């Protein structure tokens, strides 16, 4: 199978290619060609780009003939962003339409933009064991996002900030989100979710906060009012930092129950309300 090592410092703009997700021929994205879905390494240290992909299986852009049908699995890709690289939109370790995205990694070590970052992304397949490591500044960060399910994905913020939200794992539609993790040791973030779904179950996800300022932290979250599944055994551990609202689980409008979710505060400052499982009358614990 084809695999590539790509090093881009912004000098050779001829390496840039059209965005595989839209139907145009503007060369503003970086990714392996020749149906290189897996086992790629992409290093970006300079230049201005719209998107970066470690591997991509997609067929949205008719101007491209080497990005597969969208059904291929995308796995074991590594993307590293450093230096003065400015990515304006999105970074993917791996992205696929109907295949699975697994074991992809993105490392943000520098850069000047605030892009959205996904370790792995599948529109209708599984996102498994994808990771994102942040030591710079990003927008929204997601370890793994899959409509078919999101499991064992992780985000670690070693330093720096996320101007948007952080998700260990997210599953849209009916997919379940399980065993995802977030470790936050950075400066600031908006809202952190261990695991989240649109309508599926959210179980055994975890968030650990040791430093920084975070507006809200949820071990588990179900976003849609159509959600009927339970959220179970999610945890939040706080040992430092300043956090607003904290909940082991939050179901704002769905009909599922929050079961055996836990919050442990061993340090830091909680400025808002503290919940074991929000959305059920017995789940609230005032600060």
Image: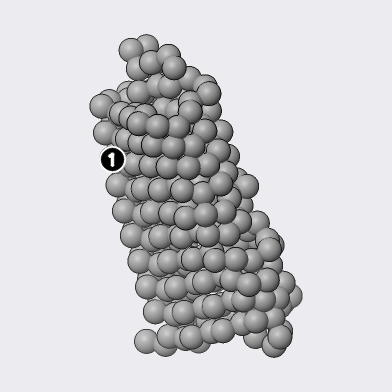
Against 53, is 245 above or below?
Answer: above
Against 283, is 196 above or below?
Answer: below
Pinpoint residue 77: horizontal percent, then vertical percent.
42, 73
Q: Residue at x 28, y 32 (%)?
A: 232
* Helix, strand or loop at mark 1: loop
Quadrant of the image occupied by residue 16: bottom right
Q: Is 176 situated left or right of 4 in this image?
A: left
**Can residue 220 be seen?**
no
Name the one closer to the observer, 245 or 17: 245
Q: Is 257 situated left or right of 6 in this image?
A: left
Name the one closer to the observer, 16 or 22: 16
Q: Residue at x 30, y 47 (%)?
A: 179
**Can residue 84 be seen?**
yes
- Which residue is the extreme one toward the top? 281
Name the one closer to the observer, 244 or 257: 244
Pinpoint residue 183: horizontal percent, then vertical percent.
40, 48
Name the one closer to the observer, 229 or 70: 229
- Can you say which quadrant of the picture contains the C terminus? top left
Against 161, is 59 above or below?
Answer: below
The residue carrying mark 1 is: 204
Pinpoint residue 146: horizontal percent, then vertical percent.
42, 53
Q: Is 160 situated left or right of 239 in this image?
A: right
Q: Residue at x 36, y 64 (%)?
A: 102
């Amino acid at each position: 199978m084809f695999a590539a090592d790509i090093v881009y410092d912004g000098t050779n703009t001829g390496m840039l290619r059209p965005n595989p997700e839209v139907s145009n021929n503007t060369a503003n994205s970086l990714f392996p060609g020749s149906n290189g879905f897996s086992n790629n390494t992409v290093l970006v240290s300079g230049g201005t780009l719209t998107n970066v992909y470690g591997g991509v299986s997609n067929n949205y852009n008719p101007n491209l003939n080497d990005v597969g049908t969208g059904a291929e699995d995308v796995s074991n890709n590594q993307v590293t962003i450093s230096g003065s690289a400015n990515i304006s939109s999105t970074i993917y370790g791996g992205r696929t339409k109907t295949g699975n995205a697994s074991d992809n990694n993105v490392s943000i070590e520098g850069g000047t933009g605030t892009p959205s970052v996904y370790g792995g992304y599948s529109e209708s397949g599984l996102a498994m064991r994808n990771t994102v490591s942040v030591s710079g500044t990003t927008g929204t960060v997601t370890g793994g996002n899959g409509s078919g399910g999101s499991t064992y994905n992780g985000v670690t913020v070693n330093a720096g900030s996320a101007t948007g939200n952080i998700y260990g794992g997210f599953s849209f539609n009916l997919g379940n989100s399980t065993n995802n993790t977030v470790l936050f040791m950075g400066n600031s973030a908006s809202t952190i979710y261990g695991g989240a779904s649109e309508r599926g179950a959210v179980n055994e996800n975890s968030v650990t906060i040791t430093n920084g300022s975070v507006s809200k932290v949820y071990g588990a979250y179900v976003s849609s009012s159509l959600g009927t599944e339970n959220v179970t055994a999610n945890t939040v551990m706080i040992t430092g930092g300043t956090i607003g609202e904290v909940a082991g689980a939050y179901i704002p409008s769905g009909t599922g129950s929050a079961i055996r979710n836990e919050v442990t505060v061993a340090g830091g400052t909680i400025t808002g309300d503290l919940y074991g499982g929000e959305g059920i009358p017995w789940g609230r614990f005032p600060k």
